[in-house]
Image (spheres, rainbow, N blue to C red):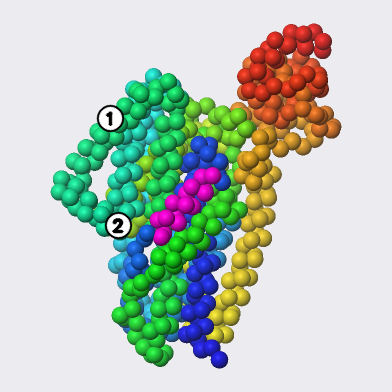
Amino acid sequence: MLDFITLAASLGLLMLIWDCVEVGRNDAANLVNAVFGARVMKRRKAVLIAGIAVIIGATFSTPVMETARKGIFDPSVLTIQMALTIYISVYFVDTVLLYAFSGFGMPVSTTACLVFELVGAALFLKGFENVSWDTVGVVTLGIIVSIIVSGIASFMVMRVFRAAIRDKTEDRETLLLHGPWIAGAMLTWLTWFMIFKGLKNVDIIKTLKSQTFGEYGEAFFLMILWGAFTLFTHLLLTLFHQRNPGILFKITAVLGMICMAFAFGQNDLANAASPGLSALTLWRSSAGMTDLVGKITNIPLPYWGLFGCGFLMACGMFTTYAQRVTRAEVNTGSQFDHVALYAPNWCRALARGIIQIRGRKRPLAPEPSITETGKKLHYDALRASVITGVSAGVIAFASGNGLPVSTTYVAFAAVLGTGLSDRVFARGDSDLKLGRAIWVVACWFIAPLIAIVSTGIIARIIYHLEIVGLAVALLLAMGARLIFKRLADAHELKYHKAADDSDSDSNEDEATSPIPKKGSLSTNALSRAGRSVSPADDSRFVFPRNPLPPPVSCDSLSPVNSNLFQWFRLMGRDICHATNHVCRPTGRRRHSGRADFEQARHDAPARRRRH
C-alpha cells in the first residue's frame, strides 16, 4: 500500500506537467503581444518561434535547480511531511490560479504567485517564525520598483523615438536619418539583456562579461555597443536602401520577442518545476517522517528533463486561453478607438477621473488602420520594438543588480507606458482601456492575498488528513477549475465574441471578416475602421436580407466613409453612395488590391448614371 510520501511525490510529478502548461499559457502574452499587436506576423507563427526559443532556453538553463525558492522559508526546521505538504499545496493552488487568470485574459506573474504560495503554506504550517519576512519584503519591493521603472522608461523612450520617427515608419528618408541610432539602442538593450539574463549560466558568456562589463564598466561598454550597432544598421540601410526599409523595426521587434522567450525558458522554468522536483528529491532521500530537509536545497536535473519542461511550457502557449491573454493585453494598449474589453465600473469611473485631470490631447500614435486581410494594427512596428527593447533593458538592469523582477509586470508596464506616451487613451473608449489597465494592476495585489490564504488552507488539509487530504485537495482543484472554466467562457462570449468577433485569432488565417448580422451596418463595424460614429452614420447603409455573391468594387464612397472601402471590399460587397445600398455584382471579373481602385474609379460615373 502506498504511503503518504510516495503518493505525494508521484502526484507532484503529475502536477509538474500540469503547472508547466499553465505557466506557458499565461506568460505567452508577455512574449508575443508586441509582435502580434503590430501584425508583424500571425499569432500562430509568433507563438511557434517564441515556443522554439523557450524550449532552447529551458534546455540550456542551469542543471542545478534551487528548491528553497529565494529563501522564502527555512527548510531546516521542517519535517519531510511538512516539506512535501508545502510543495504539493503550492501546485494545487498555482495551477488553478493561473488557469483562472488566463481564462479571463488577465496577465499575472508566475514568480509572484509562487513566492506568496510558499509564504501561505509555510505560514499556516509552521507559523510566522518560519517565514523570512525580510526576503518577502525585498521581493515585493523589487517587483513594484520594476513596474514603475518599466513604465517610466518606456514612456520616455517612446516619446523620444516618436518625436524622431512620428508615423513615418515606412518612409525611406526618415529611416535613413533616425533608424540607425534607434535600432542601435534597441539592439544594445537586447544584447545587455541576453548577457545578464538570458545567457547568464553559459560559461563563455560569464567569461566574456567579466572581461568586458567587469573590466570597463557597464555604462562605457554599452556606449561602445550602441555606436557599433548604429554604424552597422546605417551601413545595411545604405546598401539596401532600394528595398523595403520599413522592415527595420519589424526585425528589432521579432529579435526582442526571441530574446525574451529564450530568457523566459531559462529563468521561469524553476517556477513550474521546482516544487515537483523538490517533492521527488525528498522522496528519494527520505528515511522517515521526522527527517529534516535542511541539506536538500539544490537538485540536479538532466537535459532531457529540462527539454521536456520547456516543451510543456511551449505547448501551453498554443492554447485558447493563452490567446485570450494576448488579445486582452494588446487591446488594452491599442491605438484603436473601440476595442473589446472588460473593466469593472469603479475602474472605468477612476479612469474617467484620470482622463479628465490629464485632459484629452491630440494622439501621437499613427491613425488607426487595418491590414490587407482586414486585421487591426493595434501598434506600429516602432512601438512594438520599444515594448520589447525597454522590457529587456529593465530586466537586464534588475538581474545585473541582483533584484527580483517579474517578466509579466515589466512587459505589461511597457505596453501601458508606450500607450500613454502615444496618447492612445485620449480618444474613443479611453475609459475602458485605462480602466482595464487599472483592473489588471488591482488584480496583481489581489492575487497574492488569494495565494496566501488558499495555499495555507490546502496545506492544513493535506498535512492533517494525509492521503485523504490529497484526495480532497485534488477534488477541490478540479471543481474550482470547472467553475472558473464556465465563468471564463461566459465572460468571453459576453465581452469579446459578441463585441469584436473579427479580431479573434481563431479566424486569423481567413482573408475576410465575418458577415455582419442582418440589418444596418453596426457601430462596431464602423469602429473597426478606427472612426467614432453617430446614429446618422449607422443608418445610411443597409444590408439586404440574404448574403450576396462577391461583386466588383465600387469607388463611389464619399470622403467621409472612404476608410470603410477596404472593409466592404474584404466583405465581398460594394457600397454605392448614389443609392445608399449594397450594389449587386455586375458579372465582371473581380480584381484585388490596386486594380480594384483603378477599375472602380473608371466605372464610377457610369455606375452613378445607371442608378
Residue 388 position within the rendered picture, expressed as x and y whole percent measured from the top left = 40, 43
Magenta span of residues:
45-59
Q: Do residues under tags 2 and 1 come within 8 Å of each other at their CB atoms?
A: no
Residue at x 63%, y 32% (from the top left corner): 374
According to the picture, the residue beneath numbered tag 2 turns out to be: 202
Q: Which mark is residue 459?
A: none
The reply, left or right, for residue 201 in relation to residue 574 is left
Up the image or down, 431 lies above or below 79; here it is: above
Q: Quadrant of residue 144?
A: bottom left
Q: Is residue 206 magenta?
A: no
Image quadrant occupied by the N terminus: bottom right
Q: Count neighbours of disc 2 (C-alpha within 10 A) and say few if under 14, some if 14 to 19, many if 20 or more.
A: few
Residue at x 40%, y 91% (from the top left corner): 288
According to the picture, the residue beneath numbered tag 1 turns out to be: 231
Residue at x 38%, y 53% (from the top left corner): 263
Instruction: Examine the residues drawn in magenta and state their main secondary structure.
Output: helix
The reply, left or right, for residue 364 in relation to residue 203 is right
Q: Amino acid at mark 2?
A: Val
The reply, left or right, for residue 25 in relation to residue 83 is right
195 or 607: which is nearer to us? 195
Q: Amino acid at mark 1?
A: Leu
233 or 387: which is nearer to us? 233
- SS type, badge 2: loop
